[in-house]
Image (cartoon, rainbow, N blue to C red):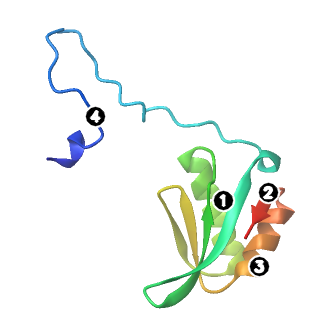
Amino acid sequence: MSNKNKQKSGVVYSTNPDYQYNDGFDQEQETLPPAQQKLYVRREVRNGKPCVVIKEFIGKADDLKALEKALKSHCGVGGSSKDGDIIIQGDLHAKVKSFLEGKGYKTKG
């Protein structure tokens, strides 16, 4: 099966010429204010190197990228965002957690 059809569950064929498939992934969630978000900050080892992963950010992709960029510049390291998670290179758990709490986010982990 090609990648473009993996998200289409259950629809095989429709006789309606005006049918539009709605996969439900077109709408992005509105970004919640920092005080309403609870982010999980975890230490992980990926490819043998330590990193910090921030999970469960609720919001738009642009806001996720902005938070990622602010974290990377604050810590002075590289990183990326993937599947709604932010990955920061290095073992900077305390620095990342204090930065997020300073911005008003609730953290756990």
Q: Label 4 crowding class (10 Å Cα cut-off): few <14, some 14-19, many 20+?
A: few
- In-front residue for pair 70/82: 82
Tell me the number on the disc at residue 67: 1
- The answer to the question of whether label 4 and label 3 lie on touching residues, with beta carbons closer than 8 A, is no
Give the vertical position of 5 relative to 101 (above or below). above
Which residue appears farthest toward the bottom when viewing the image?
48
Q: Label 1 crowding class (10 Å Cα cut-off): few <14, some 14-19, many 20+?
A: some
Q: Earlier in the sequence, mark 4 or mark 3?
A: 4
x and y, in percent, of residue 77 in the image: 61, 81
Give the vertical position of 81 relative to 63 (above or below). below
Picture quadrant of residue 14 = top left
- The answer to the question of whether label 4 and label 1 lie on touching residues, with beta carbons closer than 8 A, is no
Closer mark to the observer between disc 4 and disc 2: 4
x and y, in percent, of residue 2 in the image: 16, 47
Q: Earlier in the sequence, mark 4 or mark 2?
A: 4
Residue identified by numbered label 2: 105
Q: Label 2 crowding class (10 Å Cα cut-off): few <14, some 14-19, many 20+?
A: some
- What amino acid is labelled 1 in the image? Leu
Closer mark to the observer between disc 2 and disc 1: 2
Residue at mark 4 to residue at mark 2: CA–CA distance: 36 Å
Tell me the number on the disc at residue 9: 4
Tell me the number on the disc at residue 95: 3
Left or right: where 4 falls relative to 97 = left
Picture quadrant of residue 66 = bottom right
- The answer to the question of whether label 2 and label 1 lie on touching residues, with beta carbons closer than 8 A, is no
Give the vertical position of 62 relative to 20 (above or below). below
Left or right: where 91 falls relative to 27 = right
Residue at mark 4 to residue at mark 1: CA–CA distance: 33 Å
Closer mark to the observer between disc 3 and disc 1: 3
Closer mark to the observer between disc 4 and disc 3: 4
